[in-house]
Amino acid sequence: MKLKIALLPGDGIGPEIVGEAVKVLDSVAAKYGHQFEYSKALVGACAIDATGDPYPAETHAVCEASDVVLFGAIGDPKYDNNPAAKVRPEQGLLRMRKSLGLFANLRPLAVFDSLAGRSPLKTEIVKGADFICVRELTGGMYFGRPQGRSEDGNTAYDTCVYTREEIERILHLAFGLARGRRKKLTLVDKANVIATSRLWRQIGGELAPQYPDVELEYMFVDNAAMQIIQRPTHFDVIVTENLFGDILTDEASVISGSLGMLPSASVGAKVALFEPIHGSYPQAAGKNIANPMATILSAAMLLEHVGLQQEGKAVRDAVNQAIEAGVVTEDLAAAGAKACSTTEVGDFVAGHIA
């Protein structure tokens, strides 16, 4: 297969972790006879520094001309610590999602047996946890208008807006995912308080008869936050709006023992994008200590998205071998064990593609 892949390393540790994922993809291409063509582009703080725009037109053109996008991370302390900054790296990510029509973020969580003891939760609670969060990406408070501050600077306001079309398309996707898994869908909302949540719940009930083989349950977001910690094995597919999904998926990420293990995919009308769920971790940039596993697993999701199921499984198997062999970075290294570098982990995974 010939595949055009846009590479958006971004900021902080982004270039390092994307580099290791490319190393693994190259190993897959060599092993299975594929041809992967890469085009690199700027996004985030580095794009602001170079062009003044966190998502330049040139970057959008590269993405649109590609089959898939592999993205690293964005964010820089000089913008995080400046509340007066009018242009921010995160604006590039939001605009990229909107421009590419990426309306659904898929964040799978599966606990590796050999890492269950690394979770901050008890092993008996997390072992066997395997669910996927489906987060709506292009609506809700992050995109609601009006949005702003009063002239005196003492009041700020955001609005949360959802349309039937936005809700229906994400729910159809979530029902379909549940149908291919354990046939259970949890719709997370705050329908007892928020009007948009009541619309989500209404439409969920309207669509459920189209998926009679899928069990649909509703759960308030505060209860869901508690249940994810108390009973993570209860869930199969979780679907929710943008803000709730952002918060819940970061909460769920700690179950696996490290943010550095969790991949994600953003899909929609155009090209799909694959990225680790963690941030740019600027404190580790250039130190060769960041965990590349989430980005490598995002590359596995990328391969599976384009129909290369065997190749995706080969990457996952190689990651599992690395974990079992103790070839992991400092965030996952056992007490007293040697922590490997970013490049050592990438080398091991790339070298065990079978």
Image (spheres, rainbow, N blue to C red):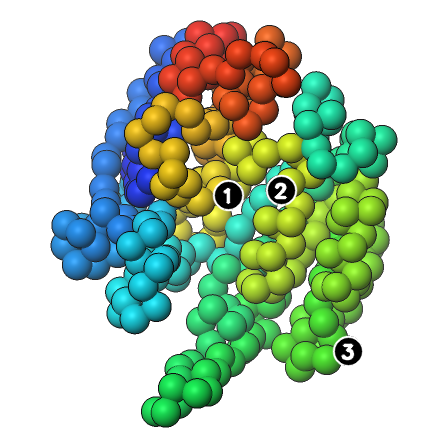
Q: Where does label 1 land, which residue?
A: 277
Which residue is pictured at 55% across the width and 28% down the height?
A: 331
Callout 2 amino acid:
Ser
Q: Earlier in the sequence, mark 1 or mark 3?
A: 3
Which residue is pictured at 50% across the width and 43% down the height?
A: 277
Give the left or right position of residue 124, taking residue 25 as reference: right
Q: Residues within 10 Å of mark 2 (few under 14, many from 20)?
A: many
Q: Please identify, in this view, whether the residue under mark 2 or under mark 3 is nearer the observer.
A: 2
Q: Earlier in the sequence, mark 2 or mark 3?
A: 3
Q: Residues within 10 Å of mark 1 (few under 14, many from 20)?
A: many
Q: CA distance from mark 2 to mark 3?
A: 27 Å
Callout 3 amino acid:
Asn
Point out residue 223 in the picture as x, y percentages from the top left corner: 79, 61
Mark 2 and mark 1 residues within 8 Å of each other at the beta carbon: yes
Point out residue 111 in the picture as x, y percentages from the top left corner: 70, 30
> Does residue 189 appear anywhere in the picture?
yes
Callout 1 amino acid:
Ile
Point out residue 194 in the picture as x, y percentages from the top left corner: 68, 79
Q: Residues within 10 Å of mark 3 (few under 14, many from 20)?
A: few
Point out residue 67 in the picture as x, y percentages from the top left corner: 35, 39
Q: CA distance from mark 1 to mark 3?
A: 30 Å
Number of the label disc, if any, that sits on residue 160: none
Compared with residue 134, is residue 194 higher up or lower down, i.e. above or below?
below
Q: Where does label 3 land, which residue?
A: 192
Q: Quadrant of residue 82?
A: bottom left
Which residue is pictured at 70% across the width and 33% down the height?
A: 119
Give the left or right position of residue 341, taking residue 335 as reference: left
Q: Where does label 2 land, which residue?
A: 253
